[in-house]
Image (cartoon, rainbow, N blue to C red):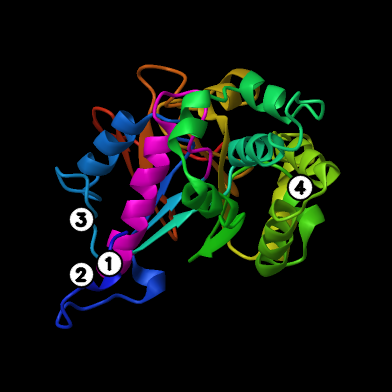
Amino acid sequence: MTDRRARPVRPASTPMRAAADRDLWVVGDVHGALNKLRSLLLQAGLIDLGGRWAAEDSHLVFLGDYLDRGPDGARVVAFIRALELQAEDAGGRVTALLGNHEVMFLAAQRFRPLDPHDGLGFREYWLRNGGLEADAERMDAADRAWLADRPAMVLAGPWLLMHADSSMYLRLGRSIREVNAQVTGMLRSADPDVWGDFANAFSDRFAFVRPDGVEIAARTLMVFGGQRLAHGHTPVYILREDFLPEANVGAPVPYAGGACLGLDSGMAYREEAGFVARLDAAGVAEVIGLNGKVEPAPAL
């Protein structure tokens, strides 16, 4: 186990910006695409060549779905956990939110000893949605506990950040604290019905592109705070193909009159896909793709 006292700390003379003034970087669904993730963070100056935190007091938020589908889910989890500690020592912050694939994975692992023939269907559900046994074999109890402790939502300056483009959060509480506490409670439950209901609800999407999507987005922001919301879960190319034909699929997709921002780049699905974005009070300030800077898209 690493001795926290042995890790270098930020020099006392290094000035720290107020939380609201820190650079805010956001990464959508990684799904085991570790090499792409490292390349993007390196190009953005968030890590160094050795893969260690290099962004001083910046705030980096991951929107969930670290494993499944791609080859290195377990290593993505280990990498983000290490960045969390490194950022803390440098005066920065890494926030890793809960995604629906973490819920599917945790359910499959939690009930496997109690349900070896998978009568409850959790393992089949996880595998059918891209689950990989290699991830389960490479992650230990500490990794699973870390996943189960992920918050569902966070407010960073003017941005409300969450995994899914779903109205589910409105049914879970009337504040970010209530939602996160409710989710923590469900992930500690021994009742398979609680897990099944949560996993099914978490698979919902497209809440903000429906005919009443602008209204749902406004209600979500009114309840939880923030001026805009950013989510992963639904790849930007699906938003474009199904709803927003003018969207640039190589960049975050602002829509619902600018109230919403889709940030799932689909990096585990398409070879050319992947980006990380810096957000500020005005919107998308900077986008880094696999081949360098990308022009942010206008709101739709």
Marked residue nearer the N-terminal end (3 or 2): 2
Of the 4 image quadrants, the one containing the N terminus is bottom left
Q: Residue furthest right?
A: 193
- Label 4 crowd (10 A; few <14 / some 14-19 / many >=20): some
Q: CA distance from mark 2 to mark 4?
A: 42 Å
In the image, is residue 35 above or below residue 281? above
Q: Residue at x 58, y 48 (%)?
A: 98
Q: CA distance from mark 3 to mark 2?
A: 18 Å
Type of the residue with mark 2: Ala
Residue 120 locus on image (x, y percent): 81, 30
Does dot 4 land on a helix, a strand or a loop? helix
Does dot 1 land on a helix, a strand or a loop? loop
Residue that mark 2 sits on: 6
Q: Nearer the viewer, residue 42 or 147?
A: 147
The magenta span reads 64-92
Q: Nearer the viewer, residue 264 or 120?
A: 120
Asked if residue 141 lies in the magenta stretch, the reply is no
Q: Nearer the viewer, residue 155 or 180?
A: 180
In this picture, residue 157 sits left or right of residue 80:
right
Type of the residue with mark 4: Met
Residue that mark 4 sits on: 168
Marked residue nearer the N-terminal end (2 or 4): 2
Q: CA distance from mark 3 to mark 1?
A: 21 Å
Residue that mark 3 sits on: 54
Q: CA distance from mark 3 to mark 4?
A: 35 Å
Q: CA distance from mark 1 to mark 4?
A: 40 Å
**Residue 285 visible in the shown view:** no
In the image, is residue 225 above or below residue 113? below
Residue that mark 1 sits on: 3
- Label 1 crowd (10 A; few <14 / some 14-19 / many >=20): few
